[in-house]
């Protein structure tokens, strides 16, 4: 009997291995993600194979803005999740209720800026009056621009506003078709890299503006695939830990991913807080932007209850201290 023990031991190990593999049988998921620093937890988790570790075959579709990522998810049911800031969530919320926020992945007080052509006569914010300014409408850049102008005694009626996809803003400013643009990184950096800085004026808001960036999920998918969503969050939570403990390595991953100079990524890194949470403050932000959307005539509808757009259970089960939504 003794000579058969090694074979029995091997058989038991194989059986144990099979059980483990069955427990994390790979599942498919598709996410629409903005090509910027904000979804760093996604790009780091992808690079370090964290999604594979939790049994996710994650397909990532890349977009130049969170607005386009979210709106693509809403139109294409094969996309399960999107990375997006607060403004597109608000604009779509008046007509759509089929998506939910499962977490904030990052926030920044210094991501959105106005970049203007100095050689078009723009040296200060006051010089924007009457100028052609490009922004990605229904995006955070759109909302930021309104607040920026207000801080300088103007509003959107005092400028000539053009709706331009985020990736195209650079070309429009360089060609001279636009006098100024409002956008975020890396689009601001990519513009400055090409156009002589002597021709540019970087205008920063005198009042800090917080940009939150979220993981949003198709509502039906979130309800029917809770385990899939949990796996995703496990992977990005691991990436969050890696980013905070290995900043230099994370910066290198991000520079390579978005095609930016590593020195620039390092210099702007501290402007971003990579923290996966669900804070009460996001409800206030969404409500404020909803009122703004109503005020500028986007809709005649009342703002929805944004608590209905928060799906907190998955994150609360994994990281309860990160959730302080009052409900």
Image (cartoon, rainbow, N blue to C red):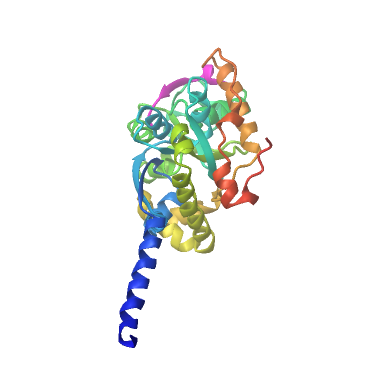
Q: Nearer the viewer, residue 147 or 76?
A: 76
| Image point (54%, 45%), residue name | 314
- In the picture, the quarter occupied by the C terminus is top right
Magenta residues span 154-165
- In the picture, the quarter occupied by the N terminus is bottom left
| Image point (42%, 45%), residue name | 36
Q: Residue furthest top?
A: 300
Q: Residue furthest front?
A: 1
Vertical placement of residue 245 versus 121, above or below: below
Would you say residue 72 sits in the magenta stretch?
no
Count of marks, rendered view? 0
Q: Position of residue 67 (x, y in %)?
A: 43, 31
Q: Nearer the viewer, residue 111 or 274?
A: 274
The reply to whether residue 183 is visible in this rendering is no
| Image point (37%, 49%), residue name | 258
Q: Position of residue 16 (x, y in %)?
A: 39, 67
Vertical placement of residue 176 versus 208, above or below: above
Q: Nearer the viewer, residue 42 or 211?
A: 42
The reply to whether residue 230 is visible in this rendering is yes
Q: Position of residue 303 (x, y in %)?
A: 59, 20
Q: Position of residue 220 (x, y in %)?
A: 45, 32
């Amino acid at each position: 009997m003794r000579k058969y023990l090694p074979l029995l031991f091997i058989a038991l190990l194989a059986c144990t291995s099979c059980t483990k593999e069955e427990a994390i049988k790979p599942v498919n998921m598709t996410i629409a993600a903005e090509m910027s620093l904000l979804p760093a937890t996604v790009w780091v988790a992808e690079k370090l194979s964290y999604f594979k570790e939790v049994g996710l075959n994650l397909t990532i579709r890349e977009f130049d803005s969170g607005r386009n990522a979210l709106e693509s998810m809403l139109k294409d049911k094969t996309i399960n999740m999107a990375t997006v800031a607060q403004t597109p969530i608000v604009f779509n919320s008046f007509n759509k209720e089929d998506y939910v926020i499962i977490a904030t992945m990052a926030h920044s007080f210094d991501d959105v800026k106005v970049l203007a052509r100095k050689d078009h006569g723009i040296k200060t914010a006051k010089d924007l009056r009457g100028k052609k300014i490009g922004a990605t409408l229904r995006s955070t850049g759109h909302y930021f621009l309104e607040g920026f102008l207000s801080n300088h005694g103007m509003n959107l009626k005092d400028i000539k506003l053009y709706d331009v996809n985020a990736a195209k803003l650079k070309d429009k400013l360089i060609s001279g078709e636009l006098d100024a643009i409002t956008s975020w990184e890396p689009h601001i950096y990519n513009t400055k890299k090409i156009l002589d800085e002597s021709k540019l004026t970087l205008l920063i808001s005198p009042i800090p503006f917080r940009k939150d960036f979220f993981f949003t999920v198709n509502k039906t998918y979130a309800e029917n695939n809770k385990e899939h969503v949990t796996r995703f969050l496990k992977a990005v939570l691991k990436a969050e830990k890696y980013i905070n403990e290995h900043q230099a390595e994370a910066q290198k991953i991000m520079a390579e991913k978005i095609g930016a100079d590593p020195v620039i990524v390092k210099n702007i890194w501290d402007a971003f807080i990579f923290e996966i949470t669900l804070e009460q403050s996001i409800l206030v932000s969404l409500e404020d932007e909803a009122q703004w959307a109503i005020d500028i005539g986007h809709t005649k509808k009342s703002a929805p209850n944004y608590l209905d757009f928060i799906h907190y259970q998955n994150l609360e089960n994994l990281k309860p201290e990160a959730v302080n939504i009052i409900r």
